[in-house]
Image (spheres, helix red, strand yellow):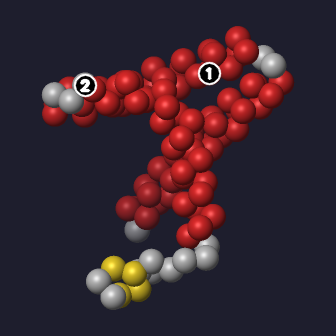
Amino acid sequence: HRTELLELILSIFFLIYFIGGFALLVALLVAGNYSAFLTVFLIRLLIDIAAYMNYGSRLRIYYGLIFLPFFQIIYPILFMLTVVLSLFKKPTWKDRKLT
């Protein structure tokens, strides 16, 4: 079950990266530490740009880069909302329940 372990490790990484990074940004903003907020935001932006360019350059799609700063704020909120709502709604696909 090596695949399940890899999926678990990736899930934990993404949870820390998206939710932890978002929580850190919010905490820095609330604390008024704007220089640290900007530093963390830019580091995360550079990581996202590097990941995006890995795929975007192969597909020759570069216009998505302008959306990355917005997605740093929007995606963690969407991620958390999906997690919470998935507790109350069981999805179906072609009239079959997904497990």
Q: Is residue 33 left or right of residue 91?
A: right
Q: Is residue 54 left or right of residue 92?
A: left
Q: Residue at x 55, y 60 (%)?
A: 82
Mark sitting on residue 40? 1
Three-letter code for the amino acid on which mark 1 is drawn? Val
Helix, strand or loop at mark 2: loop
Q: Nearer the viewer, residue 11 or 27?
A: 27
Q: Nearer the viewer, residue 69 or 83?
A: 69
Quarter of the figure with the C terminus: bottom left
Mark 1 burial class by Cα count in 10 Å: few <14, some 14-19, many 20+: some
Helix, strand or loop at mark 1: helix
Q: Residue at x 57, y 36 (%)?
A: 73
User: x%, y% of residue 44?
Assistant: 53, 26
Q: Nearer the viewer, residue 40 or 64?
A: 64
Quarter of the figure with the N terminus: bottom left
User: Is residue 13 in view from this perspective?
Assistant: no
User: x%, y% of residue 42?
Assistant: 54, 18
User: Is residue 39 in view from this perspective?
Assistant: yes
Judge whether 44 appears above or below 5 on screen. Answer: above
User: x%, y% of residue 70?
Assistant: 49, 31
Decide: marks 2, 1 in contact (CB < 8 A)?
Answer: no
Judge whether 9 appears above or below 44 on screen. Answer: below
Rendering quarter of residue 62:
top left
Label 2 – label 1 distance at C-alpha: 23 Å
Judge depth for marks 2 and 1 and give the one in front.
2
Q: Earlier in the sequence, mark 2 or mark 1?
A: 1
Mark sitting on residue 11? none
Three-letter code for the amino acid on which mark 2 is drawn? Tyr
Q: Which residue is mark 2?
A: 62
Q: Residue at x 54, y 41 (%)?
A: 74
Rendering quarter of residue 88:
bottom right
